[in-house]
Amino acid sequence: MSQRFRIYLVIAGFLPMMSITGIVTAAGLAHTWKERPTADTSFSGVMFSTDGSTVFAGGDQMFVRSWNGDKHWGGRTGIHAKMSADGNYVITPIGNGIQMIANNGSELWVRTTIAPVRAVAISSNGSLIISADDSGNIRSWGVNSESWGAVKTDLLKQVAISPSGSLVVVTSEAGLKYFTPILDQIWADNKSGSLDSFIKISADGSTVITSGESRVSSHTSSGVLNWRKDVTQDAIIDMACSDDCTTIVLGSQDGNVWVLNQLGQVQWKYPTGSWINGVGVSRDGSVIAAGALDRNLYILNQEGQLLAKTTTDTSIQQRSVAVSRDGKRIVVADQGALYGFELFGVPEVTSRETFTPAPLFPATSSTPVPINTTQPKTIPPTTTVPVTTSTPASSLNPCLAIVALSCLLLIVIRRNN
């Protein structure tokens, strides 16, 4: 056997090995860091800054850290606290008032309200703050605590501000409402009832997606109904949307991850067998994360295929999963810690053209199911979080490797003859 023949044989032998390696390492999830609260409390309501460099967690104990760990502070309560998308400010209720905090943890200002604050929102750059109290009073503030407007309405459930800061959307006991930054009412839909609990506004401000119980709705920025329908069989626990709201992700008590398009059509659902407590999505919808009550964290692509899977120590908290805009970083909070993961081996995120849906008015398909989000008292036993996980997603087709190997061997044999 000639030396050249041996070399070709070794090279050919690597081809099937490469195909097998592609199967194993096409997508993986690296456990980058883990944070525990200083007291016997839990984090919840996690989010990323726009550039993915800063992570925020609210809950019993508020926490902020940069991904590399050089910024690291927290400890105050933050049940309804929110961080600005640029990562520079945090706004949090404190009894009958609100507190503005800088990104280094220092207090900037405190302002009082008439009653305890039940919801807050902050614009992308921190220039607009909205607070709603238990007496139905809504107030708007500037970044330096100057009062912009005030109005009294029915009790609010959630409040959101469009990325441009020009539109304030609230869900209340009576229905959906739109306001200007100085709280002049633009539009109200008192026919929608009090189902909606979640609000997402597209990056260009043209589309408002709301959901609650089993219903999902889409409106334009002027209040025109695009569509409204019942989607899930059980209550929706969390919702996330791509930047253009063409990928709508729902986590439900029925154990499914549901994905809808901009027309409200179900694209696919991914069954997990356990309540989906939290969902997150990248800016273009290419990476979706879903955390289940049974401690499993699923990473899916836009077609509903599993990219990676891992488990946390205890049950994943409700509304406590987030994905960075580029899809490369995921944070999740369970009952005892906050985890940072990095996703590798997936294609680069690409921008998608924003879609403005045409008005549609389909009838509601079924009677909404009342929400019940009481979790079981039994906490699963603690297990170790794996350092990396991966799923079958070959980057090199094994059949092609076999064909290449056969051709190469045939060439070598002919040359040696």
Image (cartoon, rainbow, N blue to C red):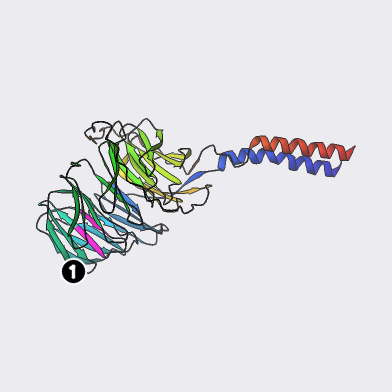
286 sits left or right of 251 in the view: right
Give coordinates of residue 202: x percent, y percent: 34, 53
Answer left or right for 308 relative to 101.
right
Residue 257, position as x, y percentages in the image: 37, 37
Disc 1 element: loop
Q: Nearer the viewer, residue 183 or 107?
A: 183
Give the residue displayed 33% in from the left and 54% down from the top: 206
**Residue at 43% of width from left, 47% of height from top?**
285
Query: Crowding at label 1, few (<14), some or many (≥20) Cα neighbours within 10 Å?
Result: few
Tell me if residue 372 comes above or below residue 351 in the rendering: above
- In the rendered image, residue 168 lying in the magenta stretch gets the answer no
Bounds of the magenta segment: 119-130
Residue found at x 77% / y 37%: 407
Report x, y in % for residue 223: 25, 50
Q: Residue 243 vs residue 156: left or right?
A: right
Residue 404 placement (x, y as % from top left): 73, 39
Q: Quadrant of residue 184?
A: bottom left
Asked if the magenta segment contains residue 126, the reply would be yes
> Which residue is at the front of the view, 384 or 161?
161
Question: Left of 232 or right of it: where is 400?
Answer: right
**Numbered disc total:** 1
Residue 291 visible in rendering: yes
Q: Quadrant of the N terminus?
A: top right
Image quarter of the C terminus: top right
Identified at 55% across, 39% down, the residue is 393
- The residue at the far right in this view is 417
Q: Which residue is mark 1?
A: 146
Quarter of the figure with residue 88: bottom left
The residue type indicated by label 1 comes to Glu
- Specify whether residue 1 is in view: no
